[in-house]
Amino acid sequence: MTIEYCLQTCWMYNFAGVEYGRECWCGNKINLTPNGSTQPTRNATSTDCNFLCPGNQTEYCGAGVRLSMYTLKNSTLSKRLDWSLLWD
């Protein structure tokens, strides 16, 4: 897993995230109140996302129950890869 691989996989979505160093998640909405909670959870810090990506040991791919999130800007069928870090 690498960040770039996940972003390319999620090219048709608004958001992409890597977790546990090996998982890639895609979606169009972010659920800020998981598990039926009425309050948003806190953003993780960069030190919370400390699992190295197996495919690129210079990148971090989230952690346990921590997603390094990215927004995919102007995602179109042309597989444009214009992204920015949302939070990690």
Image (cartoon, rainbow, N blue to C red):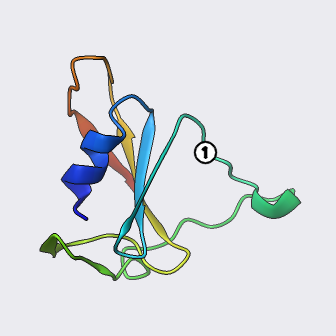
Q: Give how far across and how far down residue 58 sits, in percent.
A: 12, 75
Placement of 68 over or under 80, stated as above or below = below
- Residue placed under numbered mark 1 in the picture: 30
Q: Quadrant of residue 34?
A: bottom right
Task: Write down the quadrant of residue 61 in the picture.
Answer: bottom left
Q: Element type at marker 1?
A: loop
Residue at point 37% right, 82% down? 47
- Residue 50 location, x and y as percent? 34, 82
Quadrant into which the N terminus falls: bottom left
- The structure residue drawn at horizontal position 20% and vertical position 26%, both measured from the top left corner, is 80
Residue at (44% x, 32% y) in the render: 13
Height in image: 22 above or below 12? below
Residues 39 and 31: in front is 31
User: Callout 1, which amino acid?
Assistant: Ile
Which quadrant of the rendered structure holds the C terminus? bottom left
Sort mark 1 into few (<14), some (14-19) or many (20+) by Cα contacts within 10 Å: few
Q: Nearer the viewer, residue 52 or 45?
A: 52
Q: Residue at x 68, y 65 (%)?
A: 41
Position of residue 87 in the picture relative to residue 3 (left or right): right
Question: Which of the 4 image quarters holds residue 53?
Answer: bottom left
